Structure formats: structure tokens, C-alpha cells
Amino acid sequence: MIVAGTIGELDQFLAEARSSGKYVGLVPTMGALHRGHLSLVECCGAENDITVVTIFVNPAQFNDPEDLKNYPRDLGGDLQMLRETDCDVVFSPSVETVYPEPDLREFDFGMLDKIMEGHYRPGHFSGVARVVSRLFDLIKPHRAYFGEKDIQQLAIINKMAQMLGLPVEIVSCPTIRESDGLALSSRNVLLTPAQRENAILINRTLMKAAMKKDLQVGMLKKWVADTINENPFLELEYFEIVDRENLRPVSDMERAGEGSVGCIAVYAGNVRLIDNIFFSNFATL
């Protein structure tokens, strides 16, 4: 496994792969890796000749300076984990390498970035689009792999690739969870033991909500809010039921298609956790 910090080092490795017609897969990450990330690397390795993993904490997608400051970083641990996978090259650049000049692009994704994460984190998805499009330009992957836990980000990146005419296949991979159901997240390490114990309520509430499809949307959203907020360790930021592809809010559960998904953001103290659930996977009680 090669570790590259500069574009020259990256190009030197990829030039041979490109000249020999090898398929290059990309797994973009912000580090603090866990089994969820490694599952993306595994999928990438199975479907491509070369697997590139990027580790870059992107300042452009943080609208809260404290969140950027506190985001967990462990490059040494990340590299050790990746050496046990099919990863061929790790690209871990500096901010100056990724953005040699200020990137002031603003992306208009229509309604996709106006709700949920986009509503509560203004400018977040323009920052995501900047860095992902920049990485796509530098690496020129045939495929790129993203987890379904960030379902809105997945929709945004698909839209961005379409808008910019980028010849890359966006591959979605299932959310990986702890044995008690908590979705794996780099932020989980920031939870106190009590917060971690109570955070399992998030997934349990989503699973129960998915079996209450006979309720009206407003009533179901209220039930989720009440259930989460009754726990003294948790505070709901949002719960929305949307179409998986276009993120349009679902107004009638009886008319909701197979692609409806419940998306949630919850604070456990200062730690913000997101998750989602596909309603089609559950039968009505």
C-alpha cells in the first residue's frame, strides 16, 4: 500500500494503472475509519483493479468551526486498518494541495440541498460537492463508493456527477451497524458511555416507525419526536420521510412508494448523529 500526500505522488502511481487500462475505484473518507468505511473499501476492491482511499477532513463542508476542530483524526490508526484491506493507495493531502486556490463554487441542487441536512447545515453540500468533484478530477475513478447512512449526500453526489457530466459510476453500499443497531460513525467515539448506551434508541425508534405505516405522516413524525425527546440524553433535530431518489417529502404513507426512507438527525449532548431506514424493509404492525 502506497501513501501519497501530493498530487505528483498520486499521479505517479495512477499513471501506470491508467495506461494499462485498469479500473480505478475511489473511497472518499474524512478518516477516523471504522468498519463502515472498510466495507466500502471491500466493495471497491472486489469490483476494481485499483482501490484508492482518500483521507481528507474537508473544511468547506463544516459550517460550525467547533465541529471541524473536534472532528476525530487518527491517520496512523487509519493507515494501520487500511493495510489489512485491498487498498492500493491512500491519498492524504493537505488543504493547500486540494485547494491551491480558493474554491468559491456554489452548487444549486434545487430542493435536494434545501431540506434535512441542507436546511440545518447551510453551505454543507456545496462544500461536499467542491471536494468530491475535486477528488474526481484528480483521481479520475471509474467508480466511487459511498455509504447509504448519508442518504442525502448520496443523492447530492449523484446529482453533481450528472450536472458536471462526470464519467464516474456512483456506487451505494449498505449502512454498517454495531451489534445493538447503532449506525457506525466516526463521531461515535465522541459519545460518553451514557450517551452511547442511550444512542441505540435512534435505530430502535426508526425500526418501530417503519412498522407504523398505517399512521398519518404528521402523527408518525410526532411519535418519533416524542419518543426521542423523552430520553434525557437525546434531542431530535429532525425526522423526515422522503422519497429515496429525489428526497421529496412523503405526504401520504399509503401512497408512499417502495423507495420511501425515514431520515433522522439527533443530538447526544454536542455529538450529532444521523441515520435512516427504508420503509419497504418492514411490514406494518
Image (tube, rainbow, N blue to C red):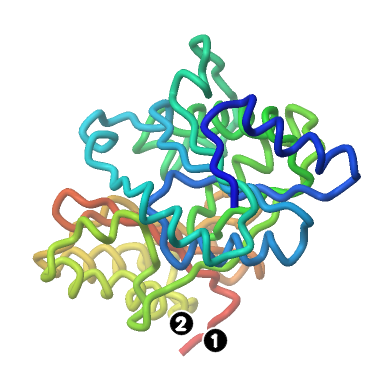
The residue under label 1 is which amino acid type? Answer: Ala
- Mark 1 vs mark 2: which is more N-terminal? 2
The residue under label 2 is which amino acid type? Answer: Met
What is the distance, in whole Å, between disc 1 and disc 2 at their CAs? 6 Å
User: Which residue is rendered at x = 36% and y = 63% of the image?
Assistant: 221
Q: How many marks?
A: 2
Residue 246 in sight? no
User: Which residue is rendered at x = 41% and y = 63% of the image?
Assistant: 34
Q: Secondary structure at mark 1?
A: loop
Residues at circles 1 and 2 in contact by the CB criterion of under 8 Å: yes
**What residue is disc 1 on?**
283
Q: Secondary structure at mark 2?
A: loop
- Where residue 66 appears, as percent x and y from the top left, is 21, 33
User: Which residue is rendered at x = 61% and y = 47% of the image?
Assistant: 89
**What residue is disc 2 on?**
211
- Which of the 4 image quadrants contains residue 199? bottom left
- Which of the 4 image quadrants contains residue 236? bottom left
- Where residue 127 appears, as percent x and y from the top left, is 48, 28
Q: Which mark is residue 53?
A: none
Quick one: 230 or 102, which is closer to the camera? 102
**In this rendering, is residue 196 above or below 119?**
below
User: In screen coordinates, is 145 left or right of 201?
Assistant: right
User: In screen coordinates, is 227 left or right of 273?
Assistant: left
- Where residue 81 appears, as percent x and y from the top left, is 45, 62
User: Which residue is rendered at x = 59% and y = 61% of the image?
Assistant: 40
Quick one: 109 or 268, which is closer to the camera? 268
